[in-house]
Image (cartoon, rainbow, N blue to C red):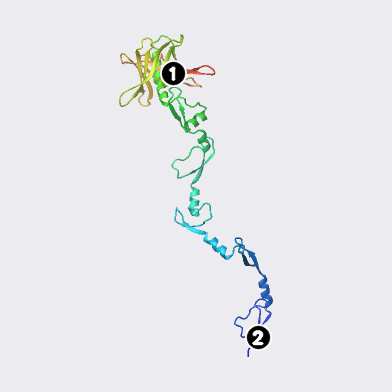
């Protein structure tokens, strides 16, 4: 005949009556069992609202049901880092899925450095792997962006680089108004009109005029400074077949005959400088040499000094650029002998 016996509750040690035929006898009393059941409560799944059983002693209480938790885990996927091949875990709902692992991202971030804009001092962020390290910040690049302008003498288009514009701005200079070709021709023209001063027994002044069908041909018109009469003209031309040379050709207005030709030249052995050499058109003999020089002590101006061949060098013809007028200024070149 079956019999009952007593055991002690595992939690409170109260007596519990147990039958010997029970396959799964209790280990805690009814009171402790009720206390345990009271610690369980229901919460709703944040995703679908399904009821979830939660124990008050749990450190991390679930906010998703098992079904929603499985769906959320399925959205986590893996890919390889493009740099080192390490596995990266990412969520399919992310707007920006990473291509690099965290260590590679840290190494890439370390390659970004900063420096100051050469113009305004603003901080520029740049990558050390860039082939060309930036010099100027974005606002300065936009403000001094490369632009195309027309030459004030010949009308040809030429570019003003960013560096040139910034350099002019920093030094308070006006932007160039003449193209490279006109700047190159300036010494030749000044050399030609400087040599003409020895042909005419009076001071001269010269203006650059535009002629031709499209007003692109520049002509240096030489006048008597006293009377204003035109006495000569200087035009730029080219000579040669393969290697073309620029030449300034001076023509007598009264006779229409060529007076001289002025070519590029160099002077000096170790420290060479560019000069303009003038040759008599009839004899082909060199008559004058012209070089660029400075005039003044504090406020220096660029002038051209022309020396006649065979002279002692003390008598020089000075050609300098000047402006006439107040509102609408007109540029001209004044030529006279200093002795």
Name the spot of residue 313 as percent of width and height, x first. 39, 15
Name the spot of residue 257 as percent of width and height, x first. 34, 12
In what quadrant of the picture does the C terminus appear? top left
Q: Is residue 80 above or below residue 183?
A: below
Q: Is residue 11 above or below residue 102?
A: below
- Near mark 2 (Cα within 10 A), the count class, few <14, some 14-19 or many ≥20, is few
Residue 148's disc number: none
The residue labelled by disc 1 is: 208
Q: Earlier in the sequence, mark 1 or mark 2?
A: 2
The residue labelled by disc 2 is: 5
Q: Are marks 1 and 2 in contact (CB under 8 Å)?
A: no
Name the spot of residue 184 as percent of width and height, x first. 40, 24
SS state under label 1 = strand
Q: Residue at x 48, y 49 (%)?
A: 108
Name the spot of residue 31 as percent of width and height, x first. 69, 76
- Near mark 1 (Cα within 10 A), the count class, few <14, some 14-19 or many ≥20, is many
SS state under label 2 = strand
Q: Is residue 143 above or below residue 6?
A: above
Q: Residue at x 48, y 58 (%)?
A: 78
Determine if residue 220 is in view. yes
Which one is in front, 330 or 8?
330
């Amino acid at each position: 005949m079956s019999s009952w016996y007593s055991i002690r509750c595992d939690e409170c040690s109260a007596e519990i009556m147990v039958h010997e035929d029970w396959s799964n006898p209790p280990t805690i009393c009814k009171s402790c069992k009720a206390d345990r059941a009271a610690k369980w409560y229901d919460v709703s799944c944040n995703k679908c609202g399904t009821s979830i059983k939660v124990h008050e002693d749990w450190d991390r209480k679930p906010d998703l049901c098992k079904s929603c938790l499985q769906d959320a885990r399925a959205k986590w996927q893996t890919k390889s880092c493009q740099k080192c091949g390490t596995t990266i875990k990412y969520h399919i709902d992310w707007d920006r899925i990473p291509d690099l692992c965290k260590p590679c991202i840290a190494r890439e971030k370390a390659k970004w450095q900063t420096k100051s804009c050469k113009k305004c001092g603003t901080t520029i962020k740049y990558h050390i792997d860039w082939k060309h390290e930036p010099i100027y910040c974005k606002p300065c690049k936009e403000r001094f962006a490369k632009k195309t302008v027309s030459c004030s003498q010949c009308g040809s288009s030429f570019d003003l680089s960013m560096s040139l514009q910034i350099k002019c701005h920093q030094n308070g200079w006006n932007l160039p108004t003449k193209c490279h070709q006109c700047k190159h021709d300036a010494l030749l023209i000044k050399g030609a009109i400087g040599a003409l001063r020895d042909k005419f027994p009076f001071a001269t002044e010269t203006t650059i005029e535009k002629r031709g069908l499209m007003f692109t041909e520049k002509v240096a018109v030489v006048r008597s400074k006293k009377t204003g009469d035109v006495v000569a003209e200087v035009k730029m031309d080219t000579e040669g077949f393969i290697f073309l040379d620029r030449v300034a050709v001076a023509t007598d207005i009264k006779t229409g005959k060529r007076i001289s030709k002025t070519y590029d030249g160099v002077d000096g052995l170790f420290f060479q400088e560019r000069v303009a050499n003038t040759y008599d058109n009839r004899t082909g003999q060199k008559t004058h040499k012209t070089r660029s020089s400075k005039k003044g002590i504090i406020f220096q101006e660029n002038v051209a000094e022309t020396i006649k061949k065979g002279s002692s060098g003390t008598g020089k013809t000075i050609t300098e650029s000047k402006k006439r007028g107040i509102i609408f200024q007109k540029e001209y070149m004044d030529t006279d002998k200093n002795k």
